[in-house]
Image (cartoon, rainbow, N blue to C red):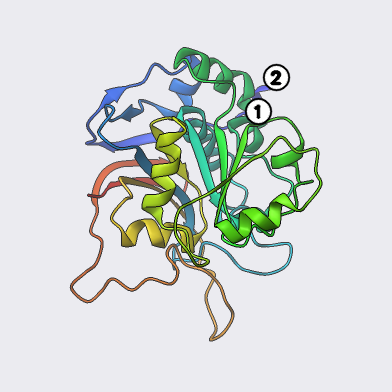
Amino acid sequence: MPSQSLPTPIDTLFDGGAGRALELPVRLARLYGQLKMPARGRRPYVFSNFVTSLDGVVSLQQAGHLGGSDISGNNLQDRMVMGVLRAVADVVMIGSGTLAADPTHVWTAEGICPELAEDYRRLRHTLRKPATPLNVVISGSGDLDLGLPVFASGRVRTLVLTTPVGAKRMAKRASASATTVLATRGSGAAISPRSILRALGQLRAGHRILLEGGPRLLGDFYERRLVDEQFLTLSPQILGRKSGDHRLSLVLDQLFAPGKGRWGRLTDVRRGASHLFLRYVFG
């Protein structure tokens, strides 16, 4: 692999986190540094990863520009970090809106940073994990195209968590997809974060759950105080907003302030040129 295709190492400016340092492959350790993860607790460890502009935009919400690459500038170091977090996760969870924003994607480490695919495979082998994390798609309506790669490519194991109505809708569609569909308990179109974690626990899906969006799903988890840590890449650009432009921030459809803000504690700061890689503990 030519060296110019690899990211340059990011610098650790502050590391005040607790937990056990994972045994990263040599090249990932050189590029990322030390990665600590907490010990297994009574419930799954939910951690989120997003990239945001300096003025808080996480998605432009324009056709062809829905994902995070416009926010990060398709930064290779950011993709490397995303790959590391996916590689240590048992589950990568997204909402149907995130799937619609990037319908050809598969949520694996090598899917976001193929330049380091072999290193990610070694890391998962060291951690005694399956080749890929379980991809979980949350969809209240069940209105999903089961021909998309995340469902039909065979590259990942995929679970759709939906409502009873959504499960009936999906059952009517003839498909060769091996995707598992599970209806959570309750009524209506909403799927509560606790019911999601309960379902994943019953399936023994694993301890580390990486939540990659979107802002509405993340907001639901913050509302229930079920986000343990937030990894946040701060991209050095200003994107701006106009009234009604629908550009998204980190959390959608939740209001916590005044007096009820979700305060985090900064535990890790890393720098790659002008991008900052931040880590906050909540709860």
Q: CA distance from mark 1 to mark 2?
A: 8 Å
Answer few, some or many: residues within 10 Å of disc 2's Cα (few below 14, many 20 plus, some between 14 and 19). few
The numbered disc on residue 11 is: none
Q: Where in the figure is residue 216, as x and y percent of width and height?
A: 47, 64
Specify the quadrant of the image occupied by residue 107: top right
Mark 1 in CB contact with mark 2 (< 8 angstroms): yes
The secondary structure type at the circle numbered 1 is helix
Q: Is residue 97 visible?
A: no
What's under tag 2, amino acid-wise? Met
Identify the residue at image location x=55%, y=83%: 242
Image coords of residue 51 (percent x, y): 49, 53
Give percent across and percent down for residue 206: 43, 30
Out of 147 and 102, give the one closest to the viewer.
Answer: 147
Residue 25, can we see it?
A: yes
Q: Quadrant of residue 105?
A: top right
Within the image, what quadrant is residue 277 found in?
Answer: top left
Q: Specify few, some or many for label 1: CA neighbours under 10 Å numbering under 14, 14-19, or 20 or more.
A: some
What residue occupies the far left of the structure in this picture?
Answer: 259
Q: Residue at x 55, y 33 (%)?
A: 134
Q: Earlier in the sequence, mark 1 or mark 2?
A: 2
Q: Secondary structure at mark 2?
A: loop
Residue nearer the viewer, 96 or 164: 164
Of residues 119 and 180, the one drawn nearer to the viewer in this rendering:
180
Lateral position of residue 176 relative to residue 111, left or right: right
Disc number at residue 115? 1
Q: Which residue is mark 2?
A: 1
Q: Give the amino acid at mark 1.
A: Glu
